[in-house]
Image: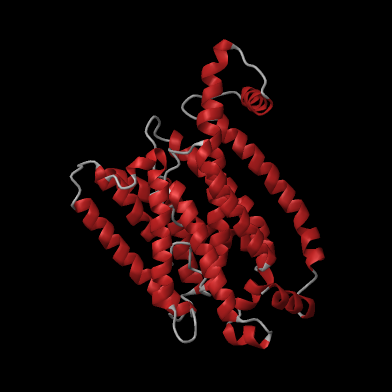
Amino acid sequence: MARDSTSFSAAVLPSASAGRRRLTGPLLALAAVLVSSVLAGIALGPTVVPVEDVVRYLVAALTGGGIGAEEVTGYSIVWEVRTPRVLLAAVVGAGLSVVGVAVQALVRNALADPFVLGISSGASVGATAVVVFGVFAGLGVYALSVAAFLGALGATVLVYLAARGSLGLTPLRLVLTGVALAYGFQALMSVLVFLSPNGQAARTVLFWLLGSLGSATWQSLPVVTAGVLVTVVVLLRHGRSLDVLSMGDESAAGMGVDAAVVRRGLFLLTALATGLIVAVSGAIAFVGLVLPHMVRIVVGSGHRRVLAVAPLAGAVFMVWVDLLARTLVAPEELPLGALTALVGVPVFIMLIRRRGYLFGGR
């Protein structure tokens, strides 16, 4: 896969080093915005902590420094509650953005997002089983995440087996299979909630389905962070192959790229990444749809450029969405998906009117 993409880029595409030079300034600026956004996300909330105190608490936590007895409450808010949540928001936003880029190339549809493959619906079945029937209760606070990830893996296997044909994983077949199984998973989840002996199960499941980072802890960060980093690195390495894949299978074959092999690898990578993200955040819609298009407007359609910028843009976006979710109606908390939909729905409609469906005419 890497060999094919390298030979293609040498023959047809512009110099990668020149592209990197043009991106250095925007990437540094966006990184600075992300750092500022993280500090703001930690400082702001129902209880406002001055930024200088936030920095001091973070330095003390990282270096083992001391704080005054009267600062224990502020330190706990900053280090134990807000910092892991804000960092998780950044990781989730980055992950959804890059997976969105990959899925749109995978199915060759500009209106696709990470949840079009039905993986999030499978994760939702696993999470619902925990909420309703206490499955994996012995795992304690990790029960929901483990069950959601196992549900995502099960959905991945089913979608792959159902969508695979004599020609491999074709884009249209993959989309239709993912959508159909997603409806099936949602129906199963509804049955589980209906049969629940717990009257609050529906509310809990609904809140999780719309996305929340309220259960973020330091323990929930390492695995999903590693998964997102691996996904970003792998996709960046094969960005040229994504350019070729988006041109169609016949064009890809003419350029020496095996579209079936690339598509199969992309499907497995994006499915696993989506499962990891959904397991810690719930199903946050529209981020993977909106952010890739916003980035393309700024940096162009080359996948390496988009994949370099999208993680930072998605991280910034999700940090601020999470901040709004926990402050707009404090002390209550809004589901993240409700806020992302307020942005995503108008953009989705605009894209349909402007671009049309890839498989449905214009």
Q: Quadrant of residue 98?
A: bottom right
Examine the rendered structure and indicate whether residue 205 appears above or below residue 324. below
Name which residue lies at 67% across and 68% down: 239
Where residue 358 appears, as percent x and y from the top left, is 49, 77
In-front residue for pair 182/315: 182
Q: Residue furthest front?
A: 138
Which residue does the image show at 28% across and 57% down from the upper left? 189
Relative side of 283 to 232, left or right: left
Residue 22 shows up from this direction: yes
Q: Quadrant of residue 250?
A: bottom right
Q: Nearer the viewer, residue 160 or 69?
A: 160
Q: Residue at x 20, y 48 (%)?
A: 196
Q: Is residue 104 above or below residue 257?
A: above
Residue 317 visible, this orientation: no
Q: Is residue 130 left or right of residue 78?
A: left
**Residue 285, how many percent across, how many down?**
44, 55
Looking at the image, which is closer to me, 254 or 223? 223
| Quarter containing the N terminus | bottom right
Residue occupying the point 46% across, 63% down: 348
Residue 320 in the image: x percent, y percent? 53, 42
| Residue 256 % position (x, y) | 68, 84
